Amino acid sequence: MSGYLALLLAAALVPAGQTAMVLKQGVISMIRNTGGSATLTCEIFSPTFDNIHWYRYQEGKAPERLVRYSMKKSESVLDTGFSANKIRAFKVKDTSCRLILSNLQISDSGMYHCASWDGPQWHRLPQFLSKTCHLK
């Protein structure tokens, strides 16, 4: 049996009438083998944001924040229980951050999204990582 991870990216969820911050990405889906890696990109257009937060939702579990990345300091802080060998976040340019998930396992399945705050407003962009097993 070979394990594959399918990565599906959804549209941004921005409250109606809120235009101060825009989150954006171009890729719609990717498929990765177990043991491989996945790269997720979050692009944010806002003059006032600093931190990008990456979250994972898995069926039947509470949401988990994986990492916070400070765009101003170019610094990432992993949340407790996550390893830098597995999860890396870094700045691509002033408006975008990438998350790399390495050595993918079926247990990495879930919905991943980036989030940021613009004053009191919260914006997020979900990215889905789900498992698909192909039997041979």
Image: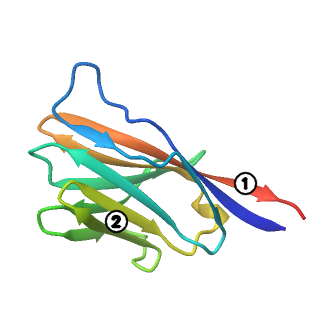
The mark closer to the camera, 1 or 2, is 1
Work out which quarter of the rendered image holds the N terminus and state it.
bottom right
Res 67 label:
none
Q: Residue furthest bottom?
A: 85
Res 132 label:
1
Give whichever of 68, 81 is nearer the camera.
68
Name the secondary structure under disc 2: loop
Q: Which kind of residue does numbered mark 2 sit on?
A: Asp
Q: Which kind of residue does numbered mark 1 sit on?
A: Thr
Query: Where residue 28 appears, x then y in whole percent?
Result: 52, 45
Disc 2: CA contacts within 10 A as few (<14), some (14-19) or many (>=20) = few
Q: How many discs mark residues in the rendered view?
A: 2
Q: Quadrant of residue 106?
A: bottom right
Query: Where residue 48 appears, x then y in whole percent?
Result: 9, 45
Q: Which residue is drawn at 29% across and 50% down?
A: 43
Disc 1: CA contacts within 10 A as few (<14), some (14-19) or many (>=20) = some
Give whichever of 65, 43 is nearer the camera.
43
Direction from residue 73 to residue 115 in the image, left or right: right
Query: In the rendered image, which residue does mark 2 sit on?
Result: 79
Query: Where residue 15 appears, x then y in whole percent?
Result: 29, 25
Direction from residue 47 to residue 57 in the image, left or right: right
115 up-or-down from 33: above or below: above
Looking at marks 1 and 2 on the same chain, the residue that comes earlier in the sequence is marked by 2
Query: Where residue 26 appears, x then y in whole percent?
Result: 42, 46
Q: Residue at x 57, y 75 (%)?
A: 103
Q: In which quarter of the image is residue 131?
A: bottom right
Direction from residue 110 to residue 1 in the image, left or right: right
Give whichever of 74, 86 is nearer the camera.
74
